[in-house]
Amino acid sequence: MALIAGTERGFISRKESVERFTKIVNFIEKADKYHGAVAHFIDGKTGKTEPFFGKRDNGADLVETSFFVQGLLAAHQYFNKDNAEEKNIRQKIDKFWKGIEWDWFRQTQDSKFLYWHWSPDQAWTINHRLIGWNETMVTYLMAIASPTHSVSASMYYSGWASQDKLAQDYRKDWGKSDEGAMYTNGNTYYGIKLDVGVNKGGPLFFAHYSFMGYDPHGLTDRYTNYFKNNQNIAKINYLYCVENPKKQKGYGKDGWGLTASDGPNGYNPDEPVEREDTGKLTPTGAIASFPYTPTESMAVLKNFYLNYGDFLWGEYGFRDSFDLNNNWCSPIFMGLNQAPMTVMMENHRTGLIWKLFMSHPDVKAGIEKLNKEK
């Protein structure tokens, strides 16, 4: 999706973009697959699975697959020319998309949930049910939209938005509170009512990853509209940083956006609650929130570039994060955090990626199915 935005903005030519996407679809065609899904990490030369998170992580990752497909379906709509190269891209995207067995990832036929991982030699050993509020809404939306291996739209409510005790306990466990344990929240923070979300909405990437292709303006369920809900999450995050209860250096109107990123003590999913506020500022947090908070996001973009750019800006844009309390800046550029900035800025400016993705006929059909469940 970032490549599409870059193509449209003239950073690369359409010809260069076609060459890159041809490489992507040829690679994924040969890569390891598990009931159609791919692994979280794949060796770039061989296409073989990299068990990055340990021996159990040696198979399918349905969530990462859904993020990837979200981008591929946008590309399917973008490369619409009637020539051999662009036809090839569309055909190979179509083949991959239709080959993913979303329904198989229920684990059992009567399961209310989709499951995140599957291992070819250890089966469902990780046993991680997909329960929101978090970044995995797109997985249910894609599974519902599949033209070949779909799940019932009712699974959105029985799984993702489940209010069963099991789901409540899951949210309480990671959120360390009862706020949002029912999926719905209903509390008011800084004068802003939060319909859905654990604590004060969680790390900001929850409002980004599922909504780079899916236009949240067009996603309304029984509980909220997701543009408004995401906007409220971003505003709460902003107001927490303005209040700055832990007196972190650099926080304020032009220093906010708590989310998951690299940190001086490793990767941490910062969020606007004191126990998960480690003091690091992550450019993608506020900048990928541009559609929700354009004025507040622009203040961060200018501040980080103009005032901290001598150490924060490099050959790939902003480094992943920095912590002024510890005089630390991340040495890495994380693609996972870079791309959302590009995509969501473009969505704010023109809606390009939203328009492309939402124009796909299978996506349209999936949204229709979900709307019938309201």
Image (cartoon, grey):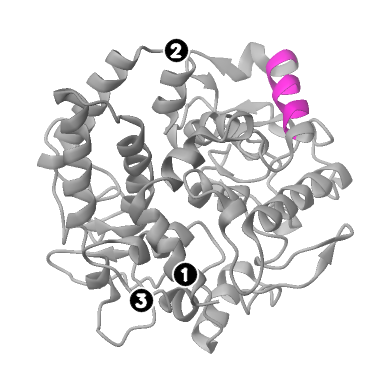
First in sequence, mark 3 or 1: give its number. Answer: 3
Please state which of residues 326 and 295 is positioned toward the viewer in this rendering: 295
- Residue identifier under label 2: 11
Tell me the crowding category of disc 3: few under 14, some 14 to 19, or many 20 or more residues within 10 angstroms, Cα based: some
* Image height of 176 relative to 9, above or below: below
Mark 3 to mark 2 CA distance (whole Å):
41 Å
Q: Is residue 327 above or below residue 204?
A: above
In the image, 104 versus 309, the foreground residue is: 104
Instruction: Write the residue at 66% across / 39% down.
Output: 291
Q: Residue 65, relative to residue 141: is it above or below?
A: above
Name the amino acid, label 1. Answer: Leu
Numbered disc in front, either 1 or 2: 1
Secondary structure state at the residue bearing disc 2: loop
Marker disc for residue 61: none
Residue 355 is inside the magenta segment: no
Overall secondary structure of the magenta section: helix
- The mark nearer the N terminus, 3 or 2, is 2
Span of residues in magenta: 297-306
On-image quarter of the N terminus: top left
Numbered tag placed on residue 370 in the rendering? 1
